[in-house]
Image (cartoon, helix red, strand yellow):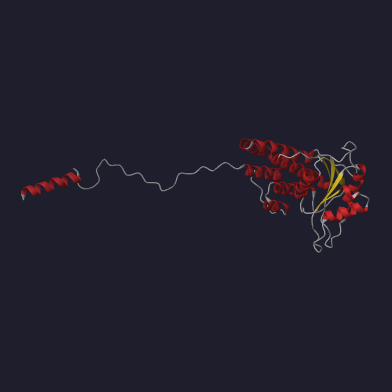
Amino acid sequence: MKKLVVLLLALVLTLCGPIGCGKAHDASPAAPVSTDAPATPEPPPTPERLIEEIITFHGCYGDRADDKVAELLEQLTASDSRQGALWRDIMDYWRYANTRLEVNLETLPEDLPQDDSLCLVVLGYELNADGTMQDELIGRLTVAEACARQYPNAVVICTGGGTAKDEPDATEAGQMGAWLLEHGLEESRLIIEDRSLTTAQNAEFSYDILLREHPRVDSVVLISSSYHIPWGSLLFEASFMKSASEWHTPEIHVVSNCAWPTENEIYKSSEILRWETGGMLQLIGRDELAMDYYYDHYEKPEL
């Protein structure tokens, strides 16, 4: 019995240590165990996101965003060299269209192609509710008629869809084409594009028609209102460059323009950059964001 008590006492002393059953005096507090997962680095922006930012920064700030746009173009080039080169060219043209592009009033230069490699593109304008044409659209057509006489071998596209509130079957292009035929244009020269509802769609659908049905065309003249020429030239040239680059198809370029001289309270010159931005966003498939710009419901990115 005495031996058993001694053995139990020795066992207790061994387990408790020399200073009792508390923590050993040289023990350090246990480090807290983190339950948070390691931070995952954000992935780099996609080329599509970079292009959207290039458009919106320039669209919101103009030349004040040049440094930011240059930085985004560098990132785009590093990510996709083809897209980088394409969008450098497009942005150069955007600046040119709004600063140095010459707008011809009511007559074209004399040095354009004299054969059917030239296409006159007449841009539509919203119809009256009953399907008749507004005076501004008739003004554009009078310019188109004169240009068609000046270049008698050029084909002519009328572009614009259904915008008549009370006449769903009436289209801008249909009404425009009928007017031109009544005023002497040969039917063999006339092309009707009657699906588009925006300038961006005018450009995309016109390129598709020319590519499929008139492959000889490589030069385009835009005919519209004077305030609309830089905007239209930008969207047509950007759309044509983008399509040729992505589809590896022949290049078509905007080589000139002719304008009906007019102002428009709906499309004030101070707001043209916003309308251009909406169109450019449509060209990259960002239709919902484009509508925010068209209707002035967008938030500026922080510069």
On the image, the x and y values in percent for residue 48 come to 64, 44
User: Which of the pair 107/31 is nearer the observer?
Assistant: 107
Q: How many marks?
A: 0
| Residue at the spot 68% in from the left edge and 35% down from the top edge | 85
Furthest residue toward bottom:
166
Where does the image place residue 287, in percent across and percent down from the top left? Answer: 69, 52
The picture places residue 183, in percent across and down from the top left corner, at: 93, 52
Residue 255 position in % (x across, y down): 82, 39
- Please tell me which residue lies in front, 237 or 185: 185
44 lies above or below 264: above
Q: Which residue is situated farthest in the left direction here?
A: 1
* Left or right: where 182 falls relative to 267: right
Q: Quadrant of the C terminus?
A: top right
- In terms of image quadrants, where is residue 109? top right
Q: Is residue 173 left or right of residue 283?
A: right
The residue drawn where x is 70% and y is 46% is 60
User: Which residue: 8% across, 49% down?
Assistant: 4
Side (left or right) of 239 relative to 174: left
